[in-house]
Amino acid sequence: LAQESRIRRSIRYRSTVGSHPTSRLSAYYPITELAMSLLSGRHFVAAVLCGFALLPPTSRATYDVGDAEEEEEDDAMSVLQRPAMATPAAAASAAAVGASSKWPILVPLQRESVPLIRNGKTVAHKTSYAGAISIGHPAQDFRVVFDTGSAHVVVPSAACSSETCLEHRSYNISASSSAHAINVDGSQVPEGELCDQVTIGYGTGKVTGEFARDEVCLGGDSEETRTCVEVSMVMAVEMTTQPFKSFNFDGIFGLSLDALAVAPEFSFFNRLAGSGFGGELQFGVFLAGPDAGQEHSSEIALGGHNSKRLLSPLQWAPVAAKKMGYWQIQIKEVRIGNKTLDVCKDGSCRGVVDTGTSHFGVPGSSIGEFQRALTTEGAEDEDCRFVDAPSMDLVLEGIMLSLGPPNYMRPLPIPVGVEVGSARGVTVESGSQVDQPAASATPSSNSDVATGGTASKASHSCAPRIMPVNLPAPLGPNLFILGEPLLSRYYTVYDWKQAQIGFGLAATKANKEALIQAGQAVDSEDEHEEEIYSFMQVTVTVSVRYKQAGVVARGRRTLTAPGLALPM
């Protein structure tokens, strides 16, 4: 490709209006309407489609994924990141399934745990939940993380030769009779032309990929138990080592609201919703947590929810700031024990419910307060989920979500002087950092944090699974990411039509035992826990490419859109 003449235009949104006469954009326009109203021609349409929202007006920095290739390794992962239509055959198949009352379709999720070693000892585990899908004809099988914090279906491309890609199953577009190589606007790539590319930055890690349209299926091998939808997707040609190389899952299956996708055709659920499929416009997520023997019992329900996974009725919270594209809710108060923290007193707190994040994300400015309040002394052989520590409560409108030590504590005690977790956590730049472990085996300069600020001779501490979230307005700065610690306690239902999220006590072994014990938090989880990951989508950059005969030309233009949510 380096020998070919081409133009690469990286399209990014800034926080201030640019000089281009068409760059003053209405904040409330959907991205696709925005693009079409501004410009004609494939390349500029694609450019505008890839843009996202802005930084505060006082900031003039342009946020994109950057040029670095790797992401730091630590104990958190976050894949935090718009909708589409089925083929006639897929729509007919879906209607038939709906008519036979097979909805919701249940997709089993397998929990994977990867140890994190410090000084020759396991101090924590990285975890993920992945399920099976297939793509194309004949079917190519993959395992993916179903992620409410991002928007796209992403799998490794057979054209990717990086070490990370080679560790996973790859998608061969040439081997699928139903596949087409496309550009970001959905047009097929002309013969001899370069295709458009996209770089997606997640809370931890990033991918660079090209676009394809193919049939994506999930729900099993039988026609009566599965559904197939034609979707535009991303074939990754580059994937950072962290977190992708560490896990066995192959890719990401984005389930966010439609505003996060580069175009509606890239959202699986939006395509499913437009296919006349016969199910409800909902999906439900059940994470069994690390209960012994429960590694294969988690699931996602598509086209409704599974009431058998509930121990209490659903309580609904409306989606806040829907145009941002995240499944996020307003948080009125946060309490630790009997104390109400100051962080949400100005009414600015929101929480993104993200199935692709392993930890509980806390606004970066308050991370120290949470650490001190939730960390306690521990012994080397102690299970930290049973220590005496305060509860953490999130007060929503008419709902209170409560987490105890069994939910938020790392089970393994941490030796004093050893740090795990990420000092940066989730940031706009986090998808562009070079691999460099944030978890350190060197002595901590703040070793008294483990005892709430009091010096102690304890050799170990019990620490919460929390990570800092440092994102600018309008998404931040007081943003929580409600990842696995909350999702393993509550069954969550995502209502696409009504734009609301339902919470009910999940029918996990731990919750059942806690109810039997008259509210005492008792469970039988094993010692396999996580390291940080987050697939919350935080940046998107699209490069529109084409050959220019006889001349090697390069150009870049930055468009401005003063109200389109998070900088992408």
Image (cartoon, rainbow, N blue to C red):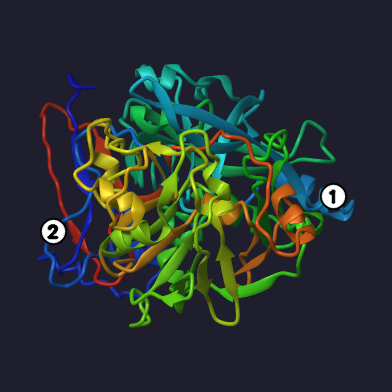
Question: To which residue does mark 1 refer?
Answer: 102
Marking on residue 61: 2
Q: Nearer the viewer, residue 23 or 273?
A: 273
**SS of the residue under disc 1:** loop
Tell me, yes or no, if residue 274 can be seen here: no
| Residue 374 found in image quarter | bottom left
Disc 2 vs disc 1: Cβ atoms closer than 8 Å? no
Q: Position of residue 326 (x, y in %)?
A: 46, 62
Identify which residue is drawn at 37% across, 19% down: 120
| Residue 31 found in image quarter | bottom left
> Would residue 302 be found to the left or right of residue 381 on screen?
right
| Residue 436 found in image quarter | top left
Q: Which amino acid, mark 1?
A: Lys
Marking on residue 511: none
Q: Which amino acid, mark 2?
A: Ala
Q: Earlier in the sequence, mark 2 or mark 1?
A: 2
Tell me, yes or no, if residue 143 can be seen here: yes
Q: Nearer the viewer, residue 292 or 270?
A: 292
Identify which residue is drawn at 9% across, 66% down: 19
- What is the total number of numbered labels drawn onto the structure image? 2
Q: Nearer the viewer, residue 304 or 90?
A: 304
559 is higher (above) or lower (below) than 462: below
